[in-house]
Image (cartoon, helix red, strand yellow):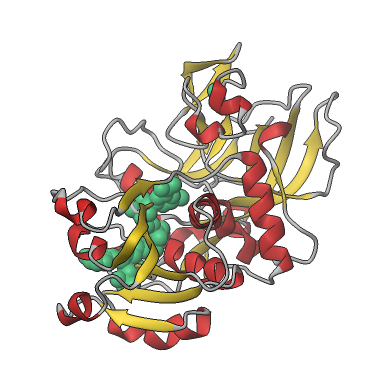
């Protein structure tokens, strides 16, 4: 296959710049995907800047990939050329461990193959000689089992963020049994947060946005929230103590979890999906009211397909700002300044020119 144009970070200190990668020829079980759009997740920034440690460079980020099947391997039965498909945060897993059998490949005990900043597998094992490269590129070869179907009629650019932001918010709402009428709060109205609002609203919950940006009030209500509370005002935490049965925390920057736990009702659950450095936790934040604090990581392949179908049924997709690839560094800076409504999506056509 000819070289594939991409954008990569050479080191944790380098801006993203044009780069070229080799994609494998599709094996019997692979599909080759011609990438149309790729969403920009805050995790791309955390990893490209090595904020979680252990980043692999050069790094081609991107795990909110949508496009069309361009070629299929000889044994592929599930896909045909031209199908609209997506790839999320991982492209393989061991397929043998308990988590993989349970359809929770994201928790593979032998390590999932992350879509980027990870490794492909050889003979089922992570192969450290074969780094993965993500969706800031024009094509990708993926095993057919790790490919998602984009429902008919869903606009591809607005579907891209569902592959991470969508499943990361759908999975905990679904897993912890959020249902119609539940009082749900979503903390942080960014890429994940705005999907959390839309999905929780579609599930029939009464949704409140807790935001550090008072200017996002109108947007929150338009996105489907029933209420909006400004978290810069300490009174908010006092006035709403014990109010919510479920809090979904999507914030990317360090903040005090104890303050938010105080807004949980008796027996309520707060789930962290945002991944900043943590602050100390007081045992009393949980003991009083038998509250639960949990975490959640993306979702498995079956659940991701379920989420896509749920979103299609409820007419849910991401609110995006489409950018050419050469605006990616600016987009990172704008995300860090909290200036995105509500997800940047790269138009990969700009990388093909
Ligand atoms: P994003 O679009 O940048 O949104 C983050 C939001 O956090 C902002 O919109 C802002 O909302 C709030 N925020 C930012 N700085 C803040 C501060 N200093 N104080 C209080 N609030 C602040 O990011 P994203 O792509 O949604 O990702 C959010 C986090 O989730 C990241 O840490 C990312 O790595 C993580 N993540 C986790 C998973 C998982 O599987 N668990 C998957 C994807 C991403 P307001 O303006 O409304 O306050
Ligand atoms: Zn992500
Ligand atoms: Zn496994």
Q: Nearer the viewer, residue 203 or 284?
A: 284
- The total number of labels drawn is 0
Q: Nearer the viewer, residue 133 or 89?
A: 89
Q: Is residue 12 above or below residue 145?
A: below
Would residue 322 be visible to someone looking at this image?
no
Q: Residue at x 31, y 64 (%)?
A: 264
Tell me the quarter of the picture where residue 208 sits.
bottom left
Q: Quadrant of ligand 3?
A: top right
Q: Nearer the viewer, residue 111 or 119?
A: 111
Q: Residue at x 21, y 48 (%)?
A: 277
Would residue 190 be visible to someone looking at this image?
yes
The spot of residue 290 in percent (x, y) is 28, 53
The spot of residue 326 in percent (x, y) is 46, 59
Q: Residue at x 26, y 74 (%)?
A: 212
Q: Is residue 280 left or right of residue 241?
A: left
The spot of residue 115 in percent (x, y) is 52, 37
Q: Is residue 294 above or below residue 161?
A: above
Q: Is residue 94 above or below residue 41?
A: above
The spot of residue 202 in percent (x, y) is 61, 71
Q: Residue at x 53, y 49 (%)?
A: 175
Tell me the quarter of the picture where residue 162 sits.
bottom right
Task: Indicate the quadrant containing the N terminus: top left, top right, bottom left or bottom right.
Answer: top right
């Amino acid at each position: 296959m000819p070289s594939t144009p991409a954008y990569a970070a050479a080191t944790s200190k380098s801006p993203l710049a044009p780069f070229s990668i080799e994609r494998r020829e599709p094996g019997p079980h692979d599909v080759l995907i011609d990438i149309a759009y790729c969403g920009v997740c805050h995790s791309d920034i955390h990893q490209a800047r090595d904020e979680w440690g252990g980043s692999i460079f050069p790094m081609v980020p991107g795990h909110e990939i949508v496009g069309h099947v361009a070629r299929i391997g000889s044994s592929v039965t599930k896909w045909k050329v031209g199908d609209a498909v997506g790839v999320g945060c991982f492209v393989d897993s061991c397929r043998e461990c308990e988590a993989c059998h349970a359809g929770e490949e994201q928790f593979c005990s032998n390590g999932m193959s992350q879509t980027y900043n990870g490794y492909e597998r050889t003979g089922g094992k992570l192969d450290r000689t074969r780094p993965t490269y993500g969706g800031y590129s024009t094509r990708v070869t993926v095993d057919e089992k790790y490919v998602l179907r984009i429902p008919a009629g869903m606009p591809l650019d607005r579907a891209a963020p569902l592959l991470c932001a969508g499943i990361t918010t759908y999975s905990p709402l679904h897993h912890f049994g959020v249902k119609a009428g539940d009082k749900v709060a979503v903390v942080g109205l960014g890429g994940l947060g705005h999907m959390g609002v839309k999905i929780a609203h579609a599930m029939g919950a009464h949704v409140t946005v807790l935001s550090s940006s008072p200017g996002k009030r109108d947007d929150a209500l338009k996105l489907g929230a029933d209420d909006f509370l400004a978290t810069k005002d300490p009174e908010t935490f006092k006035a709403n103590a014990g109010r919510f049965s479920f809090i979904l925390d999507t914030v990317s920057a360090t903040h005090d979890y104890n303050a938010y736990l105080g807004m949980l009702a008796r027996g309520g659950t707060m789930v962290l999906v945002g991944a900043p450095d943590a602050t100390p936790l007081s045992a009393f934040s949980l003991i009083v009211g038998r509250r639960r604090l949990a975490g959640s990581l993306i979702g498995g392949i079956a659940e991701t397909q379920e989420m896509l179908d749920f979103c299609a049924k409820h007419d849910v997709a991401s609110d995006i700002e489409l950018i050419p690839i050469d605006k990616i560094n600016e987009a990172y800076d704008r995300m860090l300044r909290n200036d995105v409504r509500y997800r940047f999506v790269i138009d990969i056509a700009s990388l093909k020119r």
